[in-house]
Each structure stands twice: as structure tokens, then as C-alpha cells.
Amino acid sequence: MFGITHPIVQGGMQWVARAELVAAVANAGGLGFLSALSQPTPEALSLEIARTREFTDRPFGVNLTILPSVNPPPYAEYRQAIIESGVKIVETAGYKPKEHVDDFKVHGVKVIHKCTAVRHALSAERLGVDAVSIDGFECAGHPGEDDIPGLILLPVSADKIKIPILASGGFGDGRGLVAALALGADGTNMGTRFCATHEAPIHDNVKKLLIANDERSTNLIFRKLRNTARVGKNTISDEVVAILDRPESTFDDVAALVRGTRGREVLETGDLSAGIYWAGQVQGLIHDIPSVSELILRIIREATAIIQRRLAALLA
Ligand SMILES: Cc1cc2nc3c(=O)[nH]c(=O)nc-3n(C[C@H](O)[C@H](O)[C@H](O)COP(=O)(O)O)c2cc1C
């Protein structure tokens, strides 16, 4: 469906999913998504797409994350930039993608909608998306409010959804890929694991932190605002949790701590307590900083060995 070699996808990541990473994933036979909103304008996104094409002639896509906002970015213009650039694969995420999906379909762009609940995947399927990416509770980013881990969410989804499914959240090695396939998915989508690669354009301190951290090193923030986000554990995310635990607290009490510019500073300067950073429970499985190609080939090698030896032995 997407012209790739390996069923491994790199999801859109704010400030991380830039040309270097996305092209490396494409060249290694996976599917990478540029993050549209990491670019300050739709024109800048067009340039970033052109820059990606300088590094690869393989297929890649663009992520369009639709979040409720007082001053929303010009989504329709970003969408137009994607269509005009000739990119043929888009990952949508967030709220109400209908108008975007309709327009992408008219222009022959395939859409993978990323969501966190079976009911949302079913409604995306009805909208006519080509595939869904289903984020379990383990994931970095927004896991939703149902708290259903992938081990349940994936087979429940596979029972109900007819279009291809990507398993997302908590995947980082060959064991995860085989498990995802066994649970009924057609491939995996990874975020955090791709941050700890040579090509991820973020500070080495963050990559080393992902290695030092373990599966317990995340915080769920914004729970009471019903906009839960799983982020890496640090003094700032601890503080956000503590403030929002107070009964009278509101978003305004943490707004300064969670500003996007501060999160960007963590990634760019390596100051690990400058703000919040996104990371999932899969940190417990990250022990090195390989190249993207080493990572993808290792996952495929591990998966193949598990299927051929461990699983085949069960049939003997
Ligand atoms: C640093 C970072 C930034 C992210 N930014 C976005 C984003 O802007 N839009 C989006 O749809 N998902 C975003 N995500 C979520 C990923 O695309 C992916 O769904 C998620 O990381 C999967 O869980 P995993 O980290 O356990 O692999 C981000 C994840 C990380 C780690």
C-alpha cells in the first residue's frame, strides 16, 4: 500500500521528525513522517519536504496533528502545501480530521489516521482513511482517557476494523514487532525509540537520558483536564503533576511550565530540566543509540529469528 520494504513506521514528532530522520527511515525501508507543525509556516514545510527529497528517493509522508487551540495554525494551508508538494502519504492525528481526509482523498493522498480508541478508529474507517495507527496507553504523547494498553486495544481493534492497522505505543524491538503482528496489526509505529538514533536531530543529552531511564520514567500530565499526555519524567513534569493534583488548580497554573518553547529547548540545548519532553514507557527497552538503518534491520532480524526459531519450535 505504501511502497515500503519493512512494516515499521516513524510517527510524526514535534521538533524531531525533520528531513534527516525521515529520510533515514525511508532509506532503511521504513515509512517516516515529517511533522508539519514543526515548520513555522506552510512555505517552510514545502522547503522541508524538498530537503527530505534531497536525502532520499523513497516514499515518505507528512504528519498533520490537529489539536484544539485558541489560535489554531492555518491547517488548510499546511494541507495545501502537502498536496502541492506531491507527497502521497499523510498521518493525521488528533481531532476531527474529516475536512482534511476528504481533501487528501480527492487529491490521491493516502491517509493513516492515528487514534487511541476503537470507536475513533471505526469512525476514521467510515471517513475513508486507508489505515489506522492505534496508540495504546504505553505511548508517548496523547494516550486518550480510556487507559487501555496495546495488549487489549490491538486485538479488540483487529476484531472490528477492516483496513490495515499499525500498532503504536511501546514498540522498540523485534519482540514488539512479532507481538504486534500476532495481535492482528500489520506493522508498528514508533516514536520514542526513533529519538534515540544517530539521525534524530536532538541533543545527545536527551538520547542518553532515554537510555538511562526505564519503563517507569514517564509522567501522565493533564489527567484532570481530560487531555492526558504521557511525557518523560523530570522535575518539570513532576511539578506539573503535583500542581494539577491540587483540587483548585487549573491549566493556567501550569501553562508556563509546559510551554512548547521550553520543551523545544530541552531537545535543542540538552538542558534536561528546561521543560517537558515527550517519551513513552518503551524507554525501558532503549539501551543504545544506533543509526536508523541499524535499528530497523535489527528489529527485522530479531523478529525473523523469533518467528523462525521460538515460534516455529512450538509447532514441532
Ligand atoms: C518527541 C515526541 C514528539 C511527538 N510529537 C507528536 C506530534 O506532534 N504529533 C503526533 O501525532 N504524535 C506525536 N508523538 C507521538 C508519536 O508519533 C507516536 O505516536 C508515539 O511516540 C508512539 O509511542 P512510543 O513513543 O511508545 O513509540 C510524539 C512522540 C514523541 C516521542
Image (spheres, grey):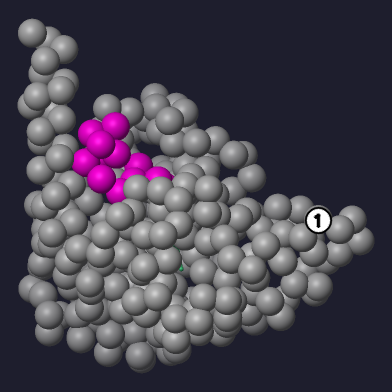
> Residue at the top extreme?
316
Horizontal side, residue 30 vs residue 192: left or right: left
Q: Report if residue 169 lies within the magenta region.
A: yes
CB at disc 1 and ligand 1 closer than 8 Å: no
Return the x and y of residue 6 as percentages of the image width and height: 14, 49
Return the x and y of residue 142 as percentages of the image width and height: 55, 55
Pick the residue in front: 157 or 267: 267
Return the x and y of residue 291 as percentages of the image width and height: 17, 66
Can residue 106 be seen? no
Residue at coordinates 10% horizontally, 33% vertically from top-left? Answer: 305
- Residue bearing the label numbered 1: 245
- Span of residues in magenta: 167-179
The quarter holding residue 254 reads bottom right
For label 1, the SS is: helix
Task: Report the image quarter containing ligand 1.
Answer: bottom left
Horizontal side, residue 162 vs residue 152: left or right: left
Residue at coordinates 53% horizontally, 61% vertically from top-left? Answer: 232
Q: Amino acid at mark 1?
A: Asp
When the figure is inspected, residue 159 is found, relative to residue 144, above or below; the finding is above
Can residue 147 be seen? yes
Quarter of the image with the C terminus is: top left
> Residue at the right extreme?
248
Horizontal side, residue 102 vs residue 137: left or right: left
The quarter holding residue 289 reads bottom left
